[in-house]
Amino acid sequence: MSDSKAPDAQAKFTQGSLFGHISVMSLTASIGLMAVFLVDFVDMIFISMLGKAELAAAVGYAGAILFFTTSFGIGMTIAAGALVARALGAGQAEEARRRATNALIYGVIFGAVFAAAVWFNLSTLASLLGATGETLELAVHYLQIIVPSLPFLMVGMIGGAILRAHGDARRAMMATIWGGLVNAVLDPILIFGLDLELTGAALASVCARVVIAITALLPLIRHYDGFDKPTAASLTIDLRPILAIAIPAILTQLATPIGQAYVTRAMADFGEEAVAGMAIVARMTPVGFGIIFALSGAIGPIIGQNAGAGLSDRVRGAFREGLVFTGIVVIVVSTLFFLARPGIQMLFQLEDGLALTLVFLFAGPLSLMFFFNGVIFVANAAFNNLGRPFYSTIVNWGRHTLGTIPFVIVGAVWFGAPGVLIGQSLGGAVFALAAFLLARRVIARQAAGTTPAEPFARQARLFSLLHHRR
């Protein structure tokens, strides 16, 4: 199939307002993300209404492990989005289609293997986080149902990344919205109607993942010439460029749940009420800052297309506008959190105690500190799309080890449970500054032509020549 038969496969981000592209991509993507995050938020509300602290704590422990599995998927998603966006930016629609096909196949295979490895070690992982007794049993039961559905989530995430690489944030958004709606409808039916409690919440999440996978693939088939027929030659030629980005991206993403696991373990020393409070904060964060989480995936195709087209000024501009956008969003959301404190307390039926203290601490000064997480997200997007994916690995692992462990230890000693969250935030600020300076250096090198424009471009060109000779 020739490139001329793919009219929608255009590099739309190489012209027009960068701030406008970032805003539209982030806002539309965040609507889809927040549809899913909001359901998790509602899950926590329903579970809190059951009045059992061990259920809320179990969801907190399970959430840390699910974050671990989702982070693996995000790594594969980054690889797919970066490679497809760069091919589109270079005007190579046929190559973009081939890469989309192979990235999806590898994502399902690797996702299934990773899910199996996690599933067989659920009890050990939850115990390492500090779960014991009935809470441990509940967390493991919940995870045993959800973890096997990781391949479906991988399909949905990678499909969404490919749509965003084409600049189609709306259809990527709708995939997660449909999944969120299914989850939202099934949650009360299964949790309360059938009295399944945690089991019902888990089954609703599995159904939502299947829906997201289906609704992400359909628009790719209908509007972007679908996928190529995979061959041994194409799978072989794309394995190296996919792994060149996916491995460091996966390592980068896994640093976050591992760092969060340490924070969860540190919080467990202060009791189940502290873990429950942290679990509520963990659900509030993506709902409030879904736009920032979406920004990390939204700005990647913008940088990738402009890098592929050799437009260095627009690459630099996209990075700058991404930081400005982050600052605006964080100020607005933090203000809303602070004003919503009384409603949050009533919603989760929080009485005076450690859980309320942690929630109010976040819905105030600490939420402003999320700006530094946004800086790291934008910097990592630049690294992944400018041929330096291992830089994002270094930054993230540094942030979630050296930027977490010593800060959390000191914070816990000085301020108790609130100090755990305070220390985590301060460590993030230090590494955000390092990420910012390193990203500026990478962008400057890209402008000077010393950063590789395309990982394994030589192999890709060789495959293209062989393909056309046939």
Image: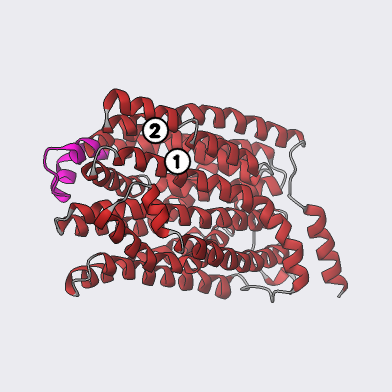
Identify the residue under disc 2: 424
Give the residues drawn in magenta, as a range. 336-358
Q: In the picture provided, is 393 more to the left or to the right than 208?
A: right
Counting residues from the start of the chain, the first of labels 2 and 1 encountered is 1
**What numbered label is drawn on residue 259?**
1
Instruction: Locate the C terminus and report the quarter of the image it occupies.
Output: bottom right
Instruction: Locate the N terminus and report the quarter of the image it occupies.
Output: bottom right
Q: What element does badge 1 sit on?
A: helix
Query: What x and y, as percent, mark residue 231?
Result: 74, 74
Residue 379 sits above or below residue 229 on the image: above
Residue 231 sits above or below residue 261 on the image: below
The answer to the question of whether label 2 and label 1 lie on touching residues, with beta carbons closer than 8 A, is yes
- Magenta part, dominant SS: helix
Query: What x and y, as percent, mark residue 51?
Result: 14, 55
Within 10 angstroms of label 1, few (less than 14), some, or many (20 or more) residues? many
Rendering quarter of residue 195: bottom left
Q: What element does badge 2 sit on?
A: helix
Within 10 angstroms of label 2, few (less than 14), some, or many (20 or more) residues? many
Rendering quarter of residue 178: bottom left
Image point 13% across, 47% down: which residue? Answer: 346
